[in-house]
Structure formats: C-alpha cells, structure tokens
Amino acid sequence: MISIRILAALAVACGLCARAVAQSDDTAFPEAAASAPGARGAAPKFEFARIRSKVASGDKIGWVENGLFCTNRTDLRANAKIEEIANAEAAAAFKAEMSSLGLRSAAPEISSFDSTPARSDPDYRVGGVLQSMNLMECHTATDRKGDFSITVKWEVFAPRLQKVVFSLVTSASIHTDSFETVGGREFEARAYLQALKQMMTDPGFTALKAVEGAPAAPPVGAAATLAPLHLKAAAAMSGGTQPNAPALRNAVVTILQGNFSGSGFYVAEGYLLTNQHVVGTAHYVKVKLANGSIIVGEVMRADARRDVALVKTDPSGVPSMHVSMADPPVGSDVFAIGSPLGENFAGTFTRGVLSGARQFNGLEYLQSDVSINHGNSGGPLLDGSSTVIAMTVSRIDQAAGLSFFIPIREAANALQLIFD
C-alpha cells in the first residue's frame, strides 16, 4: 500500500491498494500430490494459515438449553461469525500443539525492544476446511455440559513448491455429562486441539522435512542496487484498444499469493509486472492465466517504495503488452484491465479518462476516473492505442473517480528494466 499524505486515504481510508482480495474457494488450498517421506536435516518451520467453513450461515448445527434443569431448548444455527470463531480457536490450538510437539514456528519471537521483529519464511502453512459441526449443550451463567463435535479437512501447503503436500480429515468430539467450569468457548478449543493433534501426529505429517533450497525474500531496495535487465519489448498492436480487447485481456493474469489475489500483465515473454504489495514477501506465487490454467511465478525483483515487482514464469503462450514511457495528454481515453474482487472477475475491462499527473511523497502517479476495485492492483492502464502507460496501484474509497497508477517509466526505473 502506498502512502499519500495529502489524501491520507491511500494508507488509511483507501481500502483498495488493491491489495488483493481474499480468496473464496471451497478449500483453503488447491489439491496436489503428497510429498515424499521426511529425511534428516533442519527441522521444518510451520505457520497456521486459516480455517474456511463449508457450514453455511443459517444451517442448523445443534441445540442449546439453559438453567440448572436444562429447559427451553432452542435450535442453534450457524451465523456469519463461524469462520472468525473457528480461526481463533484453531490458531490457539495450533500454537499449543506446536509447543507440545516441539515443532518450529515461522512466527517471530516478540521482544519489548523490537519494533519490527523479523519473520522467517515457513516451510509449510497449515489450513483447514470445517466440514461439519454439531453442538448440543446446556449452560448456566458460568458452566456448561453436553457435546461438541467437529470434522475438519486439514491441508498442509508448501509455499516453495506451490502445492499441498499433505491432507487429512480428522474428527473430534468433546463430552461432559455433568456441569463443570467450562468457560467461554472451551468446548470448541478442546475439540480443535484434539483434531489438530490427530493430524500433527499422523505419519504423513511427521514425515515432512524442511524444504531444501527455500529462497530468501526477493531483493527489495533502490534501483541502484539492481543490475540492468534487458527485456525484448513487445510490438505495438495495430488498431485501437477496444478492438484489441480480447487479445489484451489474455495478457493480463490473476496473481494468487497466500489468501489474497491481485493482477499482473506480461510485458515480455515469461515476464510479468505487478505491485510489490500483491506479491508481499513471497518468493513464489501462483499465476492464473486468462484460460484458467495456473502456473508458478518467481518474484525476481521488487521495490517496496515504488510498489512494483517483476515476476518470471515459464513461457505462457499468451501475448505480451507493448509499453510506453510517455504519458498521454490529460483528457484522453484510458482503459484498465484486472481481476477486481478476485479471480471470478478476471479480465474486467473498464474505461475512463486521464485526469492528471500527481506527485506525492516524491513519487509520480497518474490519476484517472477509470473504475478499479480490490484485486485490480498490478493490472495495466492502457491508452487508446493498446499501449500500457501505467500500473494500477490504488484508489480512494471515500471519493468518486480518484484512482492512481504508477507510470511504466517509473516501474522500469525502479526495477532497472530496459525494453529493447
């Protein structure tokens, strides 16, 4: 996310900074083959990702009674906070079980003297999908008794390999037939601890080893620290942007990183531009092409201040976009392409006008009224001749028609790219 002092919004009010939008698949991670058994070496580092729920809001999940004699039975139904509660309980249980088993965490050790504790990259991220839940309880003002059960599909994702390497469905059930001091959501906490213990003591999980060759974070710094990289520039398309819309949309991708997504676009064979805040600290990201196929992208260069990144993929077979280092005149037509609100809206094409050139905190931006939303970040802004002039970076949510873009010349300078 960029910070624009005059408008404050791009750091606070701007919810966009297209920081991508959270993904909404039925599973926490895509399916993939299991990994080979573990071997000697450094102990792997783990990180809890999240819990998703297949239990829909409004579904009946049990009943509740109250009072010493357990009267006034009421049906219990799932609500919109089911994932929030599941994540809180599972995260706490994961931390406890990690400690119990002596496993290494990727989370930083926090000191009162550290303002920004260092975080190491995990070998594996653990997530799950809540398949079912059932609660039948009686409670007084302070105590509870009854039954609580869950079934969770756990998935272990290796960021370095960009795939799920282990998956297991576990069930846990907690029962108390007399009142005891079970405060708050203790039933739920005990169940998630039990379900996680089954998964984390399974031979498939204990066989996991540290992922060899796990890379460090991509270089992030001033342009002067990077050697020039020559890229073969794509030829300009004949005709206007609107007639070329189908081909241009094919050059734009959705970038999936962790639980978020953003946009990107090919500027040379196998090379994509996007925002640094889309890829974050990841070294590898998933790149979803316009045809629906997913390939792995490696973050080759990034500059946090200018909020730009270069991602390399295998040859994709899709056309690259012609780029220009010049700005079109104010008032001319411009077009944005991207994946607003996630991959379901990939290839969204919008039109506006170039409103002006701005400078904030010593950085240049183009301003336009073209419509963008969360997930558009990293996508291209084109002029009327099918040429990319800038990259989507942010908008101000509380204002109409105030969207901002990083000029291509600025992105090229920050990443030390030379288009031949």
Image (tube, grey):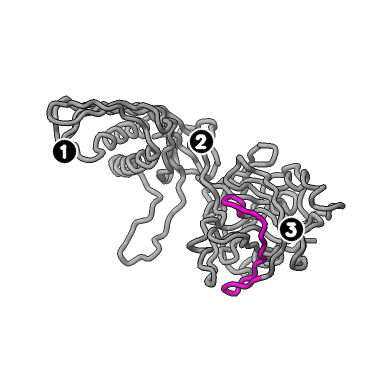
Q: Is residue 6 above or below residue 291?
A: below
- Residue 152 percent coordinates (x, y): 39, 30
- Residue 354 percent coordinates (x, y): 71, 63
* Quadrant of res 335: bottom right
Checking the image for residue 141, the label placed there is 1
Q: Amino acid at mark 1?
A: Ala
Mark 1 falls on what kind of element?
Answer: loop
Q: Residues within 10 Å of mark 2 (few under 14, many from 20)?
A: many
Q: Does label 2 or label 1 sit earlier along the sequence?
A: 1
- Residue 342 percent coordinates (x, y): 58, 44
* Identity of the residue furthest to the bottom in this view: 362
Comparing labels 3 and 2, the label whose residue is closer to the camera:
3
User: At 82% from the left edge and 56% from the top edge, which residue is drawn?
Assistant: 385
Mark 3 falls on what kind of element?
Answer: strand
The residue tagged 3 is: 334
Question: Which quadrant of the rendered structure holds the C terminus?
Answer: bottom right
What's drawn in magenta, residue-wise? 358-377
Instruction: From the viewer's side, name the closer residue of 344 and 44.
Output: 344
Q: Does label 3 or label 1 sit earlier along the sequence?
A: 1
The reply to whether residue 173 is in sight is no
Q: Is residue 277 above or below residue 8?
A: above
Checking the image for residue 164, the label placed there is 2
Q: Is residue 280 left or right of residue 384?
A: left
